[in-house]
Amino acid sequence: MSSQPVAAPAKLDGAVLKIAGVVVLGAIMSILDVTVVSVALPTFQKEFNATYAEVAWTMTAYTLALATVIPLTGWAADRFGTKRLYMAALLLFTIGSALCATADSIGQLIAYRVLQGLGGGMLMPLGMTIMTRAAGPERIGRLMAVLGIPMLLGPIGGPILGGWLIDAYSWHWIFLINLPIGLAALIYAQIVLPADRPEPSESFDFIGMLMLSPGLALFLYGVSSLPEEQTITANKVWVPMLVGAALVIGFIFYSFKPVHPLLDLRLLRNRNLAVASITLAVFTVAFMGAGLLFPSYFLQIRGESTLHAGLLMAPQGIGAMVTMPIAGILADKHPVGRTVPFALLLIAGGFYTFTQVGTDTSYLLLCGSLFVMGLGMGGTMMPIMTSALRTLKNHDVARGSTLLNILQQIAGSVGSAVMSVILTSELNDSAVIPGVTTKTGDPVTEAGLAMAAQSDPSIAASVPDPTLIERGLQFAADAFANTFTVGFVLTALTLIPALFLPRKHEESHLLDDENVPPVVLH
């Protein structure tokens, strides 16, 4: 045997980076649309004269659509080819964005967000498939670091862009901004992406689709109704959750029978994919669930504008920008089991600060903590996905990335719903102000009044007892701190499955398929 050292992985060449550019453009639109809308919810309440629970469905409906369409992506990519399907998804997302800008009721906006989600749900798994096949197994880590760019721009650019567009123009522009990006991405994809080479048509798993897609939609609908209903015993919560869970469990048992199931759970026999999936799920529930509440703290407790709240979130993305390229290179050279646990410790360390937040916590301390969390985040998500996909065969990459993406969507939806329920429950324990009710006749709490006063100073001016605002604001801050504590504990628990990530080099199987070129560029 030769004792010569193995050559270092080649750098990403220009042709691969051109393909990465197409994928990044699509992913930016999809991810930005989640974070941009998160800061627009108060605006939607005023514009459409709706409750918070109603406008929250503009985010929930998007997520439900994503979860419904992602299982179809693996089959559709094999059947129609990744280029055709990717361009169709871009077109659908862009049309959905244009329609969102024309909505004149909250119901219309929610319906158009579903259309957006049907396109957006296919962009990320297809993008991962296209890039993984283009780069080959020895460069997956570096390529995943490139795909991580939109995941950085989401937390940084989404709230800032959304706040600026709403403050300077109108809410319509948070959707209209997607039109030129979508058009550019379509032209770019047509020119740069290699011609499709669809696999021989596989039989479509209609039975699996009738179980999994409605099952996921019903389950997530029930979970997402929790913040509004405030109890799991409400029919709107437990009935769809139970029916959805039954359909999903039925699908799990059924999926091992067809030759070509809608979602190939047999891939979980791959130890790397199984461990990475568990780690990713626990992390997403914890971090993404609580992470959506960070801007809310700045808006509702500190009284910041949407633009300022977005700027205060920027250190998290900047931290991730520092470590993600490094993590990509390390993932190509070292097993992720040796790096991810340290990244998770950084996230937990930064997260701890938010378990102690009050009404006047230092912005320097909070921004520093967000930066540390970003450092850890940059070394967590993409390396975990790299570890999972590297040992799959070329033909399995589309199905493997579909599995990871749907798991991430489910975990994110569950995490955000659970954290919202905890926060709502905490806030509802605030003392009720005697004789004061909302327009719908509901009692007003001290915390509710104080948070409303943060966005509307005229409310504070009309309250005869200023200590009431101070007391309510302190209670609300404590409610946020208690909710963040749950997220911190769950983040720490992610270390347990992370310790089982591979700690030794394992051979890549991406090139094992016969007659399937690992690099589709010439």
Image (tube, grey):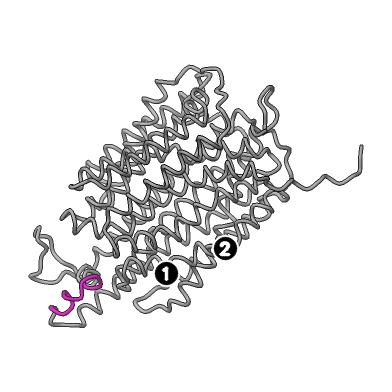
Left or right placement of residue 43 versus residue 18 in this view: left
Decide: is 92 above or below 497. above
In x, y percent, where is residue 56?
Answer: 27, 51
Residue 482 sits above or below residue 29 on the image: below
Give the extent of the magenta segment: 453-462
Name the spot of residue 96 as percent of width and height, x first: 32, 40
Q: Is residue 240 magenta?
A: no
Q: Amino acid at mark 2?
A: Leu
In this view of the protein, can residue 403 be seen by the observer?
no
Label 1 neighbour load within 10 Å: few <14, some 14-19, many 20+: many
Dividing the image into 4 quarters, which one contains the N terminus? top right
| Disc assigned to residue 422 | none
Vertical placement of residue 213 versus 449, above or below: above
How far, Cα to Cα, is label 1 from label 2? 16 Å
Residue corresponding to mark 1? 312
Which quarter of the figure has residue 44? Answer: bottom left
Determine whether, in the image, residue 218 is placed left or right of residue 288. left
Q: Does the magenta segment cover residue 456?
A: yes
Q: Is residue 218 visible?
A: yes
Of residue 117 and residue 500, the one placed in the foreground of this image is 117
Measuring from the top left, give residue 496's x and y in whole percent. 58, 52
Pointer 2 local density, CA inside 10 Å: few below 14, some 14–19, many at least 20: many
Residue situated in front as seen by the camera: 155 or 352: 155
Horizontally, residue 509 falls left or right of residue 242, namely right
- In the foreground, 288 or 432: 288
Q: Which residue type carries mark 1?
A: Leu
- At 39% from the left and 58% from the top, the residue drawn is 292
Identify residue for label 2: 375
| Mark toward the start of the polypeptide (1 vs 2) | 1
Q: Secondary structure at mark 2?
A: helix
At mark 1, the secondary structure is helix
| Dot in front, 1 or 2 | 1
